[in-house]
Amino acid sequence: MSAGAVEGAVLTLNAGSSSLKVALYPATGERPLATGIVDRIGPDGVLRLKDAAGGDIARPGDLSSHAGALQSVLDSLRAAFPGLSLAAIGHRVVHGGARHAAPVRIDAAILAELEALAPFAPLHQPHNLAGIHAAMAAFPGVPQVACFDTAFHRNHPWVNDTFALPREMYERGVRRYGFHGLSYDYIAGELARIAPGLAAGRVVVAHLGNGASACAIQNGRSVASTMGFSALDGLPMGTRCGQLDPGVMLWMMDQGMSAPEISDLLYKRSGLLGLSGISNDMRALEASDAPEAAQAIDYFVFRLQREIGGLAASMGGIDALVFSGGIGENSALIRARVCERMGWMGIEIDHARNASNARVVSSELARTTVMVIPTDEEAVIARAARAAAGTAPF
Ligand code: ADP
């Protein structure tokens, strides 16, 4: 158990449909004091919470709702860190709409704006808002900050922001917003710290987790992303389809499928799971001998190669390729497979470095540097929360 009064700390919250990820940061420094998750919010909820030394600090509590889950986290944190005072709370919010290119302090007007954006991200935004409401009720008066997955992409050139639909659709918000922005923001920052020359150039980052996307970052700014209006577009994912001809959806509707049925199919039953019929989990597919598992991996690799090529083309070339997310950080096989046919882009992998998940996995003489950078979305949220708190702890 940790001890000692912790003042001016910031809490980060990432509320999903059935989970709540949390991290507690001290007033200064990058290392969290505690990290954890409430999984399966509901009757089977589980809280896992560890301090910096890896000690279990979770206490039993009511995990049947988002509010109960937050309260249980707070009770556990207060028990582990007596005298804990929070200077600010940062929230991951999936959609910030067309307006927000940076984190924003939450007030009644912002809340109303974020609620109005819920139809654009119906599977995520309502849960993010539930987390905000629960935190505002638990800490009235403590600054709360919304950090958007869309914000990093808000300066895309118009050709990468629009679809070729009647213009009024653009005005009504049908745009290529892009997501995973907190991860890209972190990686762009890390790259600027460890390889400033590359960060000033043309970089493609592949964020490959359960959700997967790739982003073209030129001189530190996002110029194109594989995700668009929703988090369905682009790469195939654990259970999401990725790029899809809209004609397929029209056909499904003609066949009598309802919008909720199509949504369930595209978000929850497609991607690696749909193609393999085995699992949404890349580790399980890599371990399987089934030809369907191999085909699902082939499709994942092929679409990734296409998208990386397209993103590089959108910048007129590429200086670095960065892998991140659970798959990108851990799967030497996927990295090697993706880089296999990319010699034309100056990409050449060093297999020994790749096998050890080294920071740089390209060969010495390759024109394009290939890197592995573990992402840390919580660190980006914590920085924004500290900025909102100012220097004086609440
Ligand atoms: P989320 O998007 O939910 O945060 P993660 O970034 O944790 O997900 O990524 C989860 C994915 O990473 C899963 O498909 C998992 O199988 C994959 N993964 C994790 N470790 C490995 C590994 N050693 N080899 C292959 N895939 C891995």
Image (tube, rainbow, N blue to C red):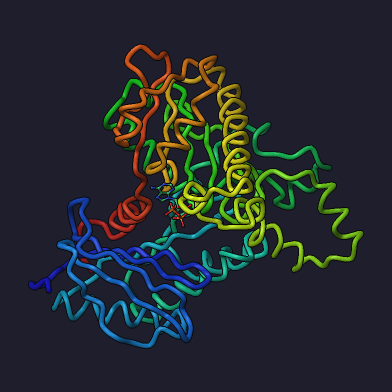
Q: Residue furthest right?
A: 254
Given residues 153 and 35, the one toward you in this image is 35
- Above or below: residue 112 compared with residue 275: below
Image location (x, y in percent) of residue 346: 47, 15
Image location (x, y in percent) of residue 291: 62, 45
Image location (x, y in percent) of residue 343: 51, 16
Please state, as top left, top right, bottom left or bottom right, where the N terminus lies in the image: bottom left
Q: Residue furthest front?
A: 289
Q: Is residue 169 left or right of residue 366?
A: right
Q: Residue at x 43, y 41 (%)?
A: 328
Whether residue 149 is visible to the viewer of this picture, yes or no, is no
Q: Residue at x 55, y 37 (%)?
A: 155
Whether residue 243 is visible to the viewer of this picture, yes or no, is yes
- Above or below: residue 228 compared with residue 92: above
Q: Is residue 24 left or right of residue 348?
A: left
Q: Residue at x 65, y 46 (%)?
A: 242
